[in-house]
Image (tube, rainbow, N blue to C red):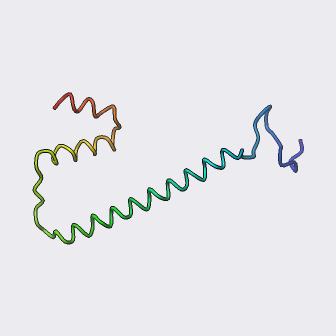
């Protein structure tokens, strides 16, 4: 066993080195994650500012808006398979 060799393998085809395509996907995933975090931070700040402007006033929602919010929450919480079940019950 040669631990100094950078191409040291455990088994027949397992290597500790990343392939170029694996590194590419790791970089892309990191960039997408960073971008998503920036968008989430922007939306949270926007919501906070709008709530401050609204103050203690009540928000009146129409029927369509009342239906959309729980559907989005269900999609975030349970996934798309639950949405079809929810639509069949209403």
Indicate left or right for 77 with 71 as reference. right
Residue 90 in picture, x, y percent from top left: 16, 32
Residue 26 in picture, x, y percent from top left: 61, 50
Indicate left or right for 89 with 78 as reference. left
Seen from the viewer's position, the closer of residues 90 and 1 is: 90
Whether 34 is drawn above or below 2: the answer is below
Residue sitting at 10 percent across and 49 percent down?
62
Residue 4 in picture, x, y percent from top left: 88, 50
Residue sitting at 38 percent across and 63 percent down?
41
Seen from the viewer's position, the closer of residues 42 and 12 is: 42
Q: In which quarter of the image is residue 55?
A: bottom left
Q: Quadrant of residue 36?
A: bottom left
Looking at the figure, which quarter contains the N terminus? top right
Whether 87 is drawn above or below 73: the answer is above
Count of all numbered marks drawn on residues in the image: 0
Whether 3 is drawn above or below 58: the answer is above
Residue projecting furthest to the right: 2
Whether 38 is drawn above or below 61: the answer is below
Residue 9 in picture, x, y percent from top left: 81, 39
Indicate left or right for 83 with 32 as reference. left
Residue sitting at 32 percent across and 67 percent down?
45
């Amino acid at each position: 066993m040669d631990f100094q060799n950078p191409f040291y393998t455990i088994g027949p085809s397992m290597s500790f080195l990343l392939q170029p395509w694996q590194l590419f996907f790791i970089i892309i995933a990191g960039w997408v994650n960073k971008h998503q975090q920036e968008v989430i931070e922007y939306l949270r700040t926007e919501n906070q500012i709008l709530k401050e402007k609204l103050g203690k006033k009540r928000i009146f929602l129409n029927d369509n808006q009342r239906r959309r919010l729980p559907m989005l929450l269900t999609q975030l919480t349970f996934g798309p398979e639950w949405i079809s079940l929810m639509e069949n019950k209403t």
